[in-house]
Image (cartoon, rainbow, N blue to C red):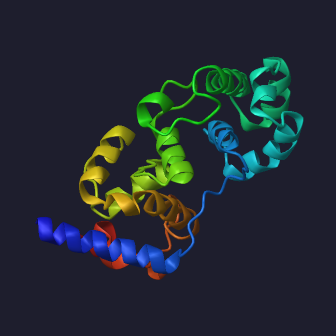
Amino acid sequence: MHMEMNERVGGIVAALKSAYPDPMCALHYQKDYELMIAVRLSAQCTDERVNLVTPALFARYPTLDAFAEADVAEVEEYVHSCGFYKHKARDIVLACQMLRDVYDRRVPDNMEDLLKLPGVGRKTANLLLGDIYGKEAYVCDTHCIRITNKLGLVSGTKDPGKVEQQLRKVLPPEESSAFCHRIVLHGRAVCTARAPKCGECTLAPFCKEFMGE
């Protein structure tokens, strides 16, 4: 069974690399803390919408200090269209204050400290660790949860924390961050939730659902 899983993982990773050779986070940012802010805004909102909002937001608050000193009510106006704007605006300002006052103006490079930041959960923390620091990272969003279940990499759970635990056991750590980005790209382009294009899916040979396993 263990050998079978290694073979399955290797095939899936290779197929995804071939289909999506240059996996990138879809969110636009230039500074590390801007990625933290963009990911917070993306909760229950599309990356496309966030990318429409952040240019004006980052222009209005061009530094970490500017965000830390911002009036939450004004930030709300900039992020209103992203939904849950009151919570998001408050978290952004408070998190930037923590980066300034506690973390020497740097986004932390470890899970424990990242989780202390307002609005940062495990999914966000994993993304920041992977994209900023190139560390082992498992971004268990809806695409990742849905598709890794279909592929048999995880089994019987849609709980993000349990999916992360199971993926940690089977995915090579050095592949983890890029794998999660590729899965998101695949989930948007091919393996959509409502109408998956199984006939053109590069992962079909590894898909337990498609193969009827």
Q: Quadrant of the C terminus?
A: bottom left
- Please tell me which residue is depicted at 57% across the width and 63% down the height of the picture: 188
**Residue 10 in the image: x percent, y percent?**
30, 73
> Vertical placement of 11 versus 80: above or below?
below
- Please tell me which residue is depicted at 68% across the width and 21% down the height of the picture: 97
Residue 192 appears in the figure: no
Name which quarter of the figure residue 172 lies in. Answer: bottom left
* Residue closest to the far left: 1
**Residue 146 in the image: x percent, y percent?**
41, 54
Which of 173 and 9 lies nearest the eye of the viewer? Answer: 173
* Residue closest to the far front: 104
Q: Is residue 127 left or right of residue 166?
A: right
Name which quarter of the figure residue 189 lies in. Answer: bottom right
Q: In which quarter of the image is the N terminus?
A: bottom left
**Residue 174 in the image: x percent, y percent?**
38, 61
> Vertical placement of 22 versus 74: above or below?
below
Which of 79 and 22 lies nearest the eye of the viewer? Answer: 22
- Please tell me which residue is depicted at 70% across the width and 41% down the height of the picture: 34
Q: In this view, does 213 lie to the left or right of 27?
A: left
- Please tell me which residue is depicted at 77% across the width and 27% down the height of the picture: 65
Which of 136 and 106 lies nearest the eye of the viewer? Answer: 106
Q: In this view, does 164 lie to the left or right of 91?
A: left
> Vertical placement of 51 versus 195: above or below?
above
